[in-house]
Image (cartoon, coloured by chain):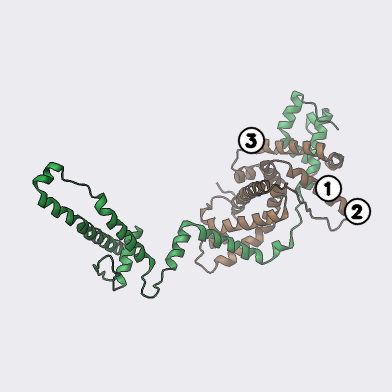
Chain colours: A brown, B green
Amino acid sequence: MQLVPDPDSDLVEACRHPENEGFEPAFEQLFLRYRDRVYAIAYRVTCNSVDAMDVVQEAFSLVFRKIDSFRSGSLFSTWLFRLVVNCSIDHRRRVRARRWQGGEGLEVAVETAADPGASPDTAAEAQEFGANIQEAIGMLSPKLRVILALRYLEEMSYEQLAATLDLSLGTVKSRIARAHLALERVVRERFPHLENVAVAGGSYGSSA
Amino acid sequence: MNSPVQQPDCRQFARQLADHLDAARAGQVPAHASMCAACGNRLKLALGLGGPLAKRPEFPPQLKHPDVLAAIHQKVIDASERSPIGQAIGAAMRVEAIGDRLPWPVQTLRVEILEHIQAAPHRQPDRNPPLVLVAGERRARFRRRLAPASAIAASIALLAVFGWRAGRSEGTNEDVRIVFVPVSELPAVMHPTAVLRQAVVR
């Protein structure tokens, strides 16, 4: 049941007809509309800028080829984010296998946007804090990373998460709880200095 | 700070952390969190991590570059060309007559027919038991001589008719001329190429 009209329905409809002239501008428009969000999710899961770029390209090439398989009963964004999640997990698996065969370690390159309004010291601290958190996220399993990315970056409700990941509401809540507990453990064990900073920032009634 | 002691209430609290986070964001302090320092701390930590988790990463400049779209299109092309249907289309597009050589479907067909002919005498079961062979030796010898020739004629005729039917079913409006030539020679006209090609593909 679709309660909200899909804001992308016109563009998606145009993309269903590659023989028409409207296909290319519609596809480009979809790409421009979603590229940042797709990149952010991919980055959270792959923990690497180069890999995230690969995922962006892979995900949109799948949109190009498989948009016919998208059923209009759901939101395009839900379908797209599911593709991105699957591409990210597959890509990470392939990269790990390649690096393992090549005897390399899996490095985590971390880039978090600095707050442009912050003073240099504060900006550097915030960037380091964000980088440490991303590193901690990188130590979680891909499934837990995915649910944190969609929940916090995309601000998805439990229902949206359930639809995107094809899970029950109960599983969604349980996975979010597991993700937080796992992240808490990593922070305590590997980044103990972050705990006080995070706890201090975690006041009741905060909207994040 | 140590991990919370795993009392039954604490385990329950951990399992329902997602709901407690929602409540805490709305300013409601869960009862257990206000009584248990460890779980209160756990909740505050989860709340505090929400900010960094929601922060988007820095976008690389190449994400905004037009080359990304070109790279996406290239991935689509690569995937299409690798697919079985893409390979079949690619092969069909490469069909060209080179000098006096015919396109590959005819050459392929000719090879197949020749292979069939070479295999035919060996595959032909001997329908005459030894006693009958003695009784009708002349007739049996005649049949053996006839077998390869009949196999050739039958296979050419079947392929031609089947190909003609296939061509008709795909809406070929042109009149089809069936030209019989010895299998060692190439047909003098191009039209049977289409008929025979479809017969081979199917």
Residue B14 or residue A74, whichever sits in front: B14
State how far apart marks 1 and 2 are (Cα): 12 Å
Q: Chain of mark 1?
A: A
**At 60% across and 44% down in the image, what residue appears?**
A163
**Residue with the mark numbered 3:** A170
The three-letter code of the residue at mark 2 reads Asp
Answer with left or right where residue A125 lies relative to residue B98: right
Q: Do discs 1 and 2 belong to a common subunit?
A: yes
Q: Secondary structure at mark 2?
A: helix
Which mark is first along the chain, 2 or 1?
2
Question: Looking at the picture, how far across and down is residue A74, in whole percent?
Answer: 56, 50
The three-letter code of the residue at mark 3 reads Gly
Q: Which mark's residue is nearer the viewer, 2 or 3?
A: 2
Q: Do discs 1 and 3 belong to a common subunit?
A: yes
Mark 3 burial class by Cα count in 10 Å: few <14, some 14-19, many 20+: few
**Residue with the mark numbered 1:** A129
Q: Is residue A122 above or below residue B86?
A: above
Mark 1 burial class by Cα count in 10 Å: few <14, some 14-19, many 20+: some
Question: Looking at the picture, how far across and down is residue B191, in whole percent?
Answer: 30, 71
Q: Is residue B107 above or below residue B57?
A: below
Q: Is residue B26 above or below residue B8?
A: below
The three-letter code of the residue at mark 1 reads Phe
Answer with left or right where residue A108 lies relative to residue B140: right
**Residue with the mark numbered 2:** A121
Determine the residue located farthest toward the bottom in the rendered image.
Answer: B99
